[in-house]
C-alpha cells in the first residue's frame, strides 16, 4: 500500500477482505470475469477470482492461456468505508458492460 502526500490510505480488515472476496467468487464469478476481461486488460481470460482489495483497488487472479496472472484494478476513487465497496464493484461491473455494449442486469 502506498502513501499519497504522506497519508496512508485506510485498509479494510482481513475479515472484510475475505468476506468480499468470498462473495465475489461464490456469487458473482461471471461478473468478476467480465470485469477482469474488460477493466483488467485481459480480454482472453477464461477465469478470474477476487484475491483481495484495499482502499484504492481490487486484486484478482486471472487465468489467461492456462496461466494464472495477478491483475489489479484501481477504483475510481479511494474508498473510506466498507459500504462503498459494493457501490464501487457495481460501478465497475456497469462500466465493463458499457464498454462491451451489454445491458447490465439490475443490482440485487
Image: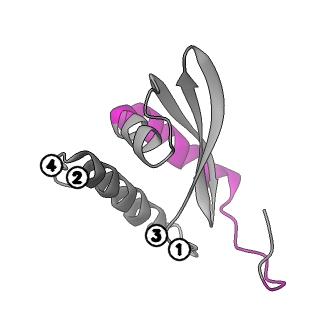
Q: Quadrant of the N terminus?
A: bottom right
Residue at 70% of width from left, 66% of height from top? 11
Q: Is residue 8 magenta?
A: yes
Crowd rating for badge 1 (residues with CA inside 10 Å; few <14, some 14–19, many 20+): few
| C-alpha gap between disc 4 and disc 2 | 15 Å
Tag 4 residue = 103
Percent across and percent down for residue 9 are 72, 74
> In the shown orientation, is residue 86 left or right of residue 59?
left
Percent across and percent down for residue 13 are 68, 58
Mark positioned earlier in the residue sequence (1 or 4): 1
Taking 81 as reference, is 67 above or below it? Answer: above
For label 1, the SS is: loop
Residue at 37% of width from left, 39% of height from top? 34
Crowd rating for badge 3 (residues with CA inside 10 Å; few <14, some 14–19, many 20+): few
Mark positioned earlier in the residue sequence (3 or 1): 1
Tag 3 residue = 84
Mark positioned earlier in the residue sequence (2 or 1): 1
| C-alpha gap between disc 4 and disc 3 | 23 Å
* Label 4–label 2 contact, CB within 8 A: no
Which region is colored magenta? 5-30
Closer to us: 55 or 41: 41
Amino acid at each position: 500500500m502506498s502513501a499519497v502526500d504522506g497519508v496512508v490510505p485506510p485498509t479494510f480488515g482481513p475479515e472484510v477482505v475475505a468476506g468480499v472476496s468470498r462473495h465475489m467468487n461464490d456469487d458473482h464469478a461471471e461478473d468478476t470475469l467480465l470485469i477482469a476481461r474488460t477493466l483488467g486488460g485481459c480480454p482472453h481470460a477464461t477465469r478470474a477470482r477476487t484475491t483481495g482489495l484495499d482502499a484504492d483497488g481490487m486484486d484478482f487472479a486471472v487465468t489467461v492461456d492456462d496461466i494464472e496472472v495477478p491483475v489489479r484494478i484501481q477504483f475510481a476513487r479511494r474508498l473510506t468505508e466498507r459500504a462503498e465497496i459494493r457501490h464501487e464493484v457495481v460501478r465497475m461491473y456497469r462500466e465493463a458492460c458499457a464498454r462491451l455494449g451489454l445491458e447490465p442486469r439490475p443490482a440485487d
